[in-house]
Image: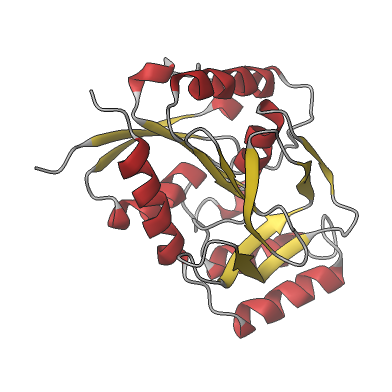
Amino acid sequence: MTRQLRLCILENGLVPDELRGDFASYPQMIERWLAPELPEASFSYVSPVRGEALPEPEAFHGYLLSGSKHSVYEDLEWIRRSRAFLQRLRELRRPVFGICFGHQLMAEAFGGRTRKASQGWGVGAQPYRYLDPSLGDGAALVFHQDQVVELPPQARVLGGSAHCPNGVLAYEFPALSVQYHPEFTPAYVEALSHRYGGGLIPAEVAAASLESLQRLCVDNARIARWAAGFFRENAPRD
């Protein structure tokens, strides 16, 4: 009989107001991405960015961390609480999977460092290469300016891109993280590129993003299968 898993998605960011009518929330995107490959899981959402209290760490078999418009080095109470929460998850060996901001927050909580990348914004589809041959190289959807620049002591690099060399991290305790967005669709990255091109992000970066979305094929299901196996292997047995 398949073991049932209870997973909690932590909402660290909000879909821009003008896009909410066309796109799901970030926790909903994450669930829609992972659920087909992990049908035995039930998903709950908690929103630190909205001020909601974090759960007791033992309340769930595992956790997923969403992206955010915020930077992990901002002096915000909910970010400080989230870092402490991650350190508690490490002590309990509760599996956690981080995405974009979540990737950076985990690195900061576990002893690494994040900053704005000197190479600027990464937007669109980018080729990623992996040291683990079972993952296979492939394109990923990205939208970020910050990067992990110093690895935590117990982290190792599993993959990255020319733009983001520390793009995929694994830890000696049950934790994985990716700088890219496996939960995003090309349509959402296209909408972000149109929304922020010429403003938040340079017009030429937005144009290159739109071109990359046409040129590169992204297989998010492959990463979902990897994440599903991670939770099956590392979730505690009640």
In this view, which residue lies farthest toward the right? 118
In this view, which residue lies farthest toward the left? 1
In the picture, measured across the screen, residue 40 lies left or right of residue 118, that is left
**How was this image coloured?**
secondary structure
Q: Residue 66 lies in what quarter of the image?
A: top right
In the picture, measured across the screen, residue 96 lies left or right of residue 51, that is left
Q: Where does the image place residue 44, in percent across and percent down from the top left?
A: 35, 32
Q: Residue at 27% x, 41% y: name it.
A: 41
Q: Where does the image place residue 130, in percent across and percent down from the top left?
A: 59, 64
As displayed, is residue 64 above or below residue 218?
above
Image quadrant containing the C terminus: top left
Image quadrant containing the N terminus: top left
Q: Does residue 141 appear in the picture of this structure?
A: yes
Q: Does residue 51 appear in the picture of this structure?
A: no
As displayed, is residue 30 above or below residue 112?
below
Q: Residue 167 lies in what quarter of the image?
A: bottom right
Q: Where does the image place residue 75, in percent across and percent down from the top left?
A: 79, 22
Q: Please tell me which residue lies in front, 157 or 202.
A: 157
Q: Please tell me which residue lies in front, 114 or 213.
A: 114
Q: Residue at 35% x, 50% y: name it.
A: 229
Q: Please tell me which residue lies in front, 220 or 131.
A: 131
Q: Residue at 76% x, 48% y: name it.
A: 147
| Mark count | 0
Q: Residue at 57% x, 56% y: name it.
A: 181
